Amino acid sequence: MKMTEPSLWWSVRRGLDKRLKELLKSIEEVWMGCWKGVFQGKIADATAYQALKSSVTTVLVKAAKYKLHCCNKRLLEAVLDSDLTAYQLSVAVCRLFGIAHSHPAHDSLVQLMQLRAVKDNPERHPVILILDKAIQALPWESVPILQKNPVSRVPSLAYLQAQLWYYSQTLDNVYIRGADTSKTYFILNPSNDIPKTQAQFENVFKGQGWPGVIGQPPQKEEFQAAIAGKDVILYCGHGSGREYLSGDLIEQTLCRACPILMGCGSGRLKVSGPKIEPWGVVLQYWLGGSPCVVANLWDVTDRDIDRFTEGLLTSWIPTLVTKTHVPDITKAVQVARKACKLQYLIGAAPVVYGIPVHSMGARQS
């Protein structure tokens, strides 16, 4: 839809934004249900986590008085670690202890679990999603319960293990020591047809003293040298930039940098049949050695994704921080989503592929 009638255009876009928000809420309430706490990261604070374990013990002691046995203590912990409705708690109690709603212990256990459930929003360890090809196109990171967690996604557990082993053997890498954001290479408006994006970021990028190209395509050799030698690649253009550097070359390069690809569908994975795993440029960066990639799952509008980009840079890049430095890129992406006018239709599109990377340093005056 072209923006020939602004009022109609915005009405349709806001309607789609609302529908996506409702879909994600439905995924949590219907698909995840009373087990949604399983998707949360482990509580980072030792004292808070010990309090949760104590709550699990209290519930088990209560159940033992009725001669009931919990079928899965990890699921009980997840239930107590999430904000459930009375109905969801009732379902959880019935399934965990194998009882009916009419059992004498039912109401007592539900009330105790309501009382002992985690009420605040503690700091958590990262969540890394491994998504099947049938569901990987959905923005799981924006499901309500996952909005409270730092989240990234990887293609497989085996490759995650291989990457972590590789980084442990090569200590001078962005994942181990953090990203030095002064070592950033940028590509801004390479097709020379998004002047508003260029106007918003040109002086910012130049002011940081970063090397890069503006209003013209990068040279293939220069682009390839940047992903091998820089810590961060910042791409503000159409798509993923693969027309300037092919995916095959990316895979063959020893990629050091963390690419931030802000073009339409830069993080979209193509599914080619039921027996072939999805593929895309983000996975080629991952195969080449990049610890993480920030990219968009679907097409986005330039003005709103520029708001996201600005929010990400002013949270994650120490020398651009306007409020609080957020060194974890997964958390910085969370913060930046809130800058979008359409927080689901546009804000849910950017996701992090790979392992959470931290930016080095603190804000400089």
Image (spheres, helix red, strand yellow):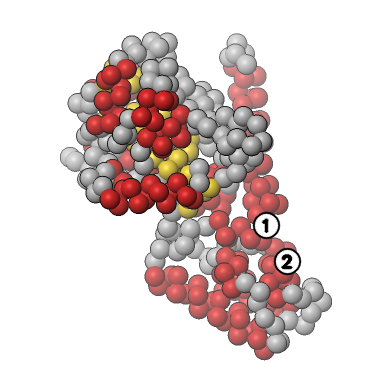
Q: What SS does tag 1 mark?
A: helix
User: 294 above or below 74?
Assistant: above
Along the horizontal axis of the image, is 91 left or right of 328? right
The 10 Å Cα crowd at callout 2, few under 14, some 14 to 19, many 20 or more, is: some
User: 47 above or below 141?
Assistant: below
Along the horizontal axis of the image, is 285 left or right of 96? left
Say which quarter of the image contains residue 298.
top right
| Identity of the residue furthest to the left in this view | 365
Q: Position of residue 302 (x, y in %)?
A: 47, 22
Say which quarter of the image contains residue 185.
top left
User: 334 above or below 194?
Assistant: below
Q: Distance between the residues labelled 1 and 2?
A: 9 Å
Q: Which of 72 and 288 is in front in this view?
A: 288
For badge 1, the amino acid type reads Gly
The 10 Å Cα crowd at callout 1, few under 14, some 14 to 19, many 20 or more, is: some
The quarter of the image holding the C terminus is top left
**Disc number for residue 91:** 2
Residue 321 visible in the picture = no
Residue at left offset 73%, top offset 66% = 91
| Residue occupied by mark 1 | 33
Along the horizontal axis of the image, is 45 left or right of 138? left
Q: Where is residue 113 in the image (x, y as percent from the top left)?
A: 62, 73
